[in-house]
Amino acid sequence: MQRLVQSSNPTRKGAPDLVLCKPQPSLTLCSHVCRGQPDVLITEDEEYKRVNFDKFKKLNTVFQKENGTVTAGNASTINDGGAACIMMTRQAADRLGVKPLGRVVAFADAEIDPIDFPLAPTHAIKKLLQQSGVSKDEVVMWEIHEAFSVVPLATVKLLELDPARVNLHGGAVSLGHPIGMSATRIVQHLLYALQPGQKGVAAVCNGGGGSSSIIVEKL
């Protein structure tokens, strides 16, 4: 997958379009097996309901003890989960007879000092918009991965984004952050939430000061 993306960068002149295709329907109910206990059928996402706002003011800060702002209350939870998508060229989609969910307009990476990691998506998005020629006004939805609430908040402030267009249906603090799947989740969320012809931007911190960003268009 990585080699395909690197060799088919859609921002390069003459490069083939990359499209994201809808997977086959999957089960809507999950069973959780506990030894000696009956299976439990999960019919809804219960994570965002597991919160006690009365405890928020009592939580200790983590990265900075004095005058710190990041606590367990505004950090993502640890969850199990998975996500997958299929990326292929337009020619391959036509040959296989599959209808794409959307297309990759452009993507970009950026990196800064690891201590400033919450600001990394800001740099990746700036680079992305500059290279692609897409303006902020053309972007209908923004999915900024919320490992910590400060990340999308900083991005909104520094890039002067409309907060009403950012993480519309919740971020990782409320929905959870299964390590290794969140980037795929937010990209696919854009493709399911957007209307045909609309563009969305997703961005994540990669750890160590790195960030990746992508523009997709719903087909």
Image (cartoon, rainbow, N blue to C red):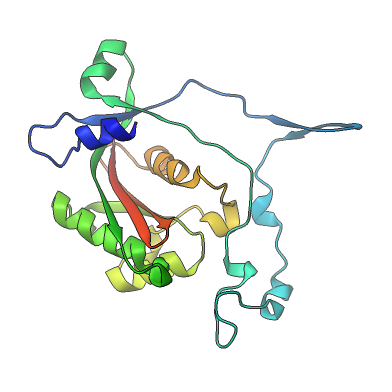
Residue 173 in the image, given as x and y percentages of width and height: 57, 59
Determine the image quadrant of residue 172. bottom right
**Residue 64, visible in the rendered structure:** yes
**In this picture, is 175 found above or below 116?**
above
Answer with left or right where residue 77 lies relative to residue 108.
right
Task: Count up the numbered dots.
Answer: 0
For residue 179, side relative to residue 215 (left or right): right
Does residue 141 appear anywhere in the picture? no
Locate residue 120 relative to residue 151 in the image: left or right. left
Task: Name the residue rendered at 49%, 52% in the picture.
Answer: 169
Residue most extreme to the left? 13
Q: Nearer the viewer, residue 180 or 213?
A: 180
Of residues 70 and 1, the one nearer the viewer is 1
Q: Quadrant of residue 110?
A: bottom left
Q: Position of residue 185 (x, y in %)?
A: 47, 42
At 69% from the left and 71% from the top, the residue drawn is 53
What residue lies at 31% left-to-right and 12% top-to-bottom? 96
Q: Which residue sits furthest bottom?
A: 66
Q: Split into 4 quadrants, where in the image is the N terminus?
A: top left
Which residue shows up at 55% across the image and 37% down it? 82
Report the quarter where the C terminus lies: top left
Residue 17 in picture, x, y percent from top left:
19, 30
Q: Position of residue 190 (x, y in %)?
A: 39, 44
Name of the residue lying farthest toward the right: 36
Asked whether 113 or 74 is in front, the reply is 113
